[in-house]
Image: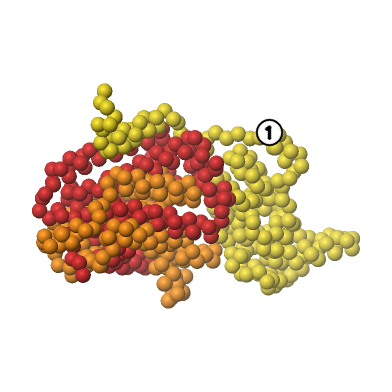
Chain colours: A orange, B yellow, C red
Amino acid sequence: MSEQNEKLNKEKPYWNPYLSGIGLGIVLLLAFVIMGRGLGASGAFSSLVVSVENAVAPSHVQSNEHLKGYFEGGVNPMKDWLVFEVIGVLAGGFISGMLAGRVKKGIYRGPQITDKMRIVYAVIGGVMMGFGAKLARGCTSGQALSGGALLNLGSWAFMLSVFAGAYALAYFMRRQWT
Amino acid sequence: MRNMKNLTLKQKLAGIALLLGVIALFAGNPYKGNHFSIDSKEMELILSKGADLVKPEELADWTIQGKSDFNVVDVRSEKDYQQYHIPNSVNVPIAGLNKAGLSKTEKILLVCTDGTISAQAWTFLKAKGYKGVYILKGGLNEWNSKILFPSLPENATPEQTAAFEKTKEVSKYFGGTPTIGGKTETKEAPKVQAPKLETPSGTNTQSSEPKKKKEGC
Amino acid sequence: MNAPFIKYGMFGDNVGLIVAFVVGIGFGFFLERAGFGNGKKLAMQFYFRDMAVLKVMFTAIITAMLGVYFLSVFGVLDLSMVYLVPTNILPQIVGGLILGFGFVVGGYCPGTSCVSAATGKIDGMMYIVGVIIGIFIFGEVYPLIGNFYNATPMGQITISEWANIPYGVLVFAVVLMALGGFAAAEWAEKKNAGKEGSLITERTDA
């Protein structure tokens, strides 16, 4: 344990959350001012999913009203603001991680859980997240952050229910994290 | 009073946020959509020249030539739009115009049944600071009579007949039915209702234009 | 100056995509700086031990909210041209709950999992795989749930319009709420400091 901590100590500490928050807020503000729209993440994965589905089974996409919508007017769903933004997120995260010495293969988990179980939970959580984000028309970035700053009614309702859902289930997940 | 230097970073940031929040209490509504002004001189000039009116023939030419630096915005209800709309037009019912977020850079050509609603929308957008706003003269009524169902009187002069030949092609391009002296050129009887135009049915549609362009948005 | 720039034709769609990439870099950078590439740190929010999620999120929201508000009031930004996601209140509440479950089960949200994956964390990468599966499932069952997805539409609406409260008053209220939340968060962190299992850097290195 102490050995591991020693190793981790070489990584630079995270920034003050309020300063990171101001940084994020300014990036979000720039998106509004330059592009007239906010940030997002899950939308990029939607574009990826429908593009792959369209390449594999185009007739299936055409029979589904929701999937079909991505190709209306002959647009390419990958040529989208969110897709390029998320590629930027990957790059930005990597740059910051490199500068702080945090780019390292590993798995974050609680002390009582095996790596294998942690991965299983990660996939299950991801599935729920993906489904929920589609249903809610956005995720924490697109709805809570961007819509939150614009005082969007649906975004605030969404944000409250995200916290409600997470806190409600936290007790049952305690073995994974604590 | 405590010295400012004794405050922690957190407290300073909180103070700034609070101060801005208090100012916001008195600074008013950020949605300026409610107050706009019109340059009356500019307006007078446009009105006297009728410069913001586009004839159906012009729109037809632009579409056939594949001009795409303008947006055709149909301000009728969604139901009317579903029934028939000009190819490549988008539907923004007039009630939703304020929030539609139409681009200020592209030309906007407003379309409605007879031009009345377009005129309202035109004034609204002009007031909001849109520069290139145009109206389809006579609306879809004139579009129907001039483009989709043009007719040539039987006692037409040769000039009229020559001009009609061109109109005929245009009409067929948009899937319309030209008539001469009350008789249709094609075997179909003239329909009162405009045909659906998602897939132009005319035979002269094999132009070099990509198919994609003809679909509605 | 007229903003949003792209709506006033300062550049076209292709340049917009480059802007998206650059803005994304900023987004990813600050997420990583805040420690949001770390699922354990994120999850500790829901045990009141590390309140960074709340602090960072609400600091970002009030920063952007105040920025948008004052730029609009001063006439720099035309707020009516900034895109508001339309509200469908019921599916958004249910979607939010499912998403909240996913957050505490998986430890990330889509944006933070990207940052986690970009810094080499396997759990972040597998989480993305899960998100992709979840989105795929949604698309496939859409014919069954499409009605619910489109239920209770309210259009593009702000809380200000809905509750008929002046926008500026709401801005003030959100700032107050956030500051109150921060104070509570600091208190909770102090109270739970040193509890077993709180070490946020806990992980397996490969």
For image coordinates 18% across by 66% down, the residue present is C204
For image coordinates 11% across by 61% down, the residue present is A1
For image coordinates 28% across by 38% down, the residue present is B9
Q: Is residue C113 visible?
A: no
Residue closer to the observer: C75 or B53: C75
Disc 1 residue type? Ser
- Quadrant the C terminus of chain C occupies: bottom left
- Residue that numbered label 1 is attached to: B40
Residue B41: percent from the left, percent from the top? 71, 34
Residue closer to the observer: B61 or A21: A21
For image coordinates 60% across by 41% down, the residue present is B129
State left or right for residue A150 relative to residue B109: left
Q: Residues within 10 Å of mark 1 (few under 14, many from 20)?
A: few
Residue A68: percent from the left, percent from the top? 46, 66
Residue A53: percent from the left, percent from the top? 41, 72
Circle 1 sits in a helix, a strand or a loop, which is it? helix
State left or right for residue A172 relative to residue B194: left
Residue closer to the observer: B141 or B69: B69
Q: Is residue A105 visible?
A: yes
Residue C22: percent from the left, percent from the top? 44, 56
Q: Residue furthest top?
A: B1
**Count of number-bearing discs:** 1
Relative to residue C15, is residue A20 depicted above or below? Answer: above
Q: Quadrant of residue B172?
A: bottom right
State left or right for residue A32 relative to residue B58: left
Name the chain under label 1. Answer: B
Relative to residue B183, is residue C6 depicted above or below? Answer: above
- Quadrant the N terminus of chain C occupies: top right
